[in-house]
């Protein structure tokens, strides 16, 4: 073997070793570990309530509606096992899902998407979903026929929304308390895997108040 052949062989061996070193080995498992710090803010149709005295009064009045995160235990409750780059197996509260989920990533958001397609309808009246920042990866809407009671229908696949945090994952969570003008009781919406979007406030009814608690479940 001449000198050129020896050098060529060495380059080939180094290249193969490098590929093996850089390749991802599956399965890879991530498990829920802890809850990040949270805060509660108050909003009306015109934006965030900034007066400290008003915020403190409203939050203290409705704090019991929110999950007490200091007592919430999430360690090991959610397990995500990547079987490949494009498929993940979820176990939630120690119950494994029957079907694998597809994995998509777009604009910094990871979507763990269910296989089944669902359909729902909506109107132009405000709903709490108007305040969601993230929406399904697969989403198709069309006008509803007259007399259906809806403005539009939409088809979608449910997703778990994930934000990459270095080598870890964060599951964004949000809770709402919707307080209608003239009512003392608030309407509670909790355990929502999403983030809050201020853009939806424009659809809120005049005089109503929305309390928002945001936090993340960290997976590693």
Image (spheres, grey):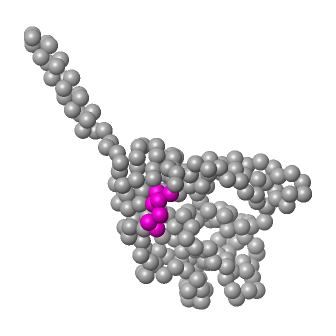
Q: Position of residue 98 (x, y in %)?
A: 52, 54
Outermost residue toward the right? 147
**Res 55 seen here:** no
> Does residue 139 appear left or right of residue 173 in this picture?
right
Quadrant holding the C terminus: bottom left
Residue at 76% across / 59% down in the picture? 122
Specify whether residue 96 is painted magenta: yes
Residue for point 46% across, 43% down: 86
Q: Nearer the viewer, residue 98 or 128?
A: 98
Q: Quadrant of residue 134?
A: bottom right
Q: Nearer the viewer, residue 10 or 78?
A: 78
Q: Residue 57: name its quadrant.
A: bottom right
Instruction: Return the x and y of residue 169 as percentages of the image width and height.
Output: 41, 58
Q: Nearer the viewer, residue 49 or 95?
A: 95
Image vertical order of residue 148 relative to residue 210, above or below? above
Span colored in magenta: 90-97
Placement of the N terminus among the 4 image quadrants: top left
Residue 194 at least partly seen: yes
Q: Is residue 138 left or right of residue 101?
A: right
Horizontal and vertical percent position of residue 185? 69, 86
Give the left or right position of residue 45, taking residue 125 as reference. Answer: left
> What's the residue at 62%, 47% (across, down)?
138
Magenta-drawn stretch contains 161: no
Coordinates of residue 115 in the picture (x, y in percent): 58, 48
Residue in front for this viewpoint, 187 or 126: 187
Count how many numbered circles sit on residues in the image. Answer: 0
Residue lying farthest top? 2
**Magenta segment, principal secondary structure?**
strand
């Amino acid at each position: 073997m001449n000198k050129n052949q020896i050098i060529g062989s060495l380059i080939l061996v180094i290249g193969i070793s490098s590929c093996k070193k850089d390749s991802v080995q599956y399965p890879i498992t991530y498990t829920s570990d802890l809850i990040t710090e949270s805060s509660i803010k108050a909003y009306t149709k015109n934006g965030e309530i900034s007066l400290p005295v008003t915020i403190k009064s409203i939050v203290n009045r409705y704090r019991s509606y929110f999950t007490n995160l200091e007592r919430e235990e999430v360690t090991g409750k959610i397990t995500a096992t990547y079987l490949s780059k494009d498929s993940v197996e979820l176990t939630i509260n120690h119950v494994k899902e029957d079907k694998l989920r597809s994995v998509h990533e777009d604009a910094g958001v990871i979507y763990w998407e269910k296989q089944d397609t669902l359909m729902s309808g909506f109107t132009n009246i405000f709903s709490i979903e108007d305040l969601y920042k993230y929406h399904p990866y697969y989403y198709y809407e069309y006008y509803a026929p007259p007399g259906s009671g809806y403005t539009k229908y939409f088809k979608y696949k449910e997703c778990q929304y994930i934000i990459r945090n270095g080598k870890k994952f964060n599951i964004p969570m949000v809770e709402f308390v919707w307080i209608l003008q003239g009512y003392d009781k608030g309407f509670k919406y909790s355990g929502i895997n999403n983030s809050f979007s201020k853009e939806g406030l424009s659809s809120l009814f005049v005089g109503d108040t929305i309390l928002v608690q945001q936090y993340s479940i960290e997976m590693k």
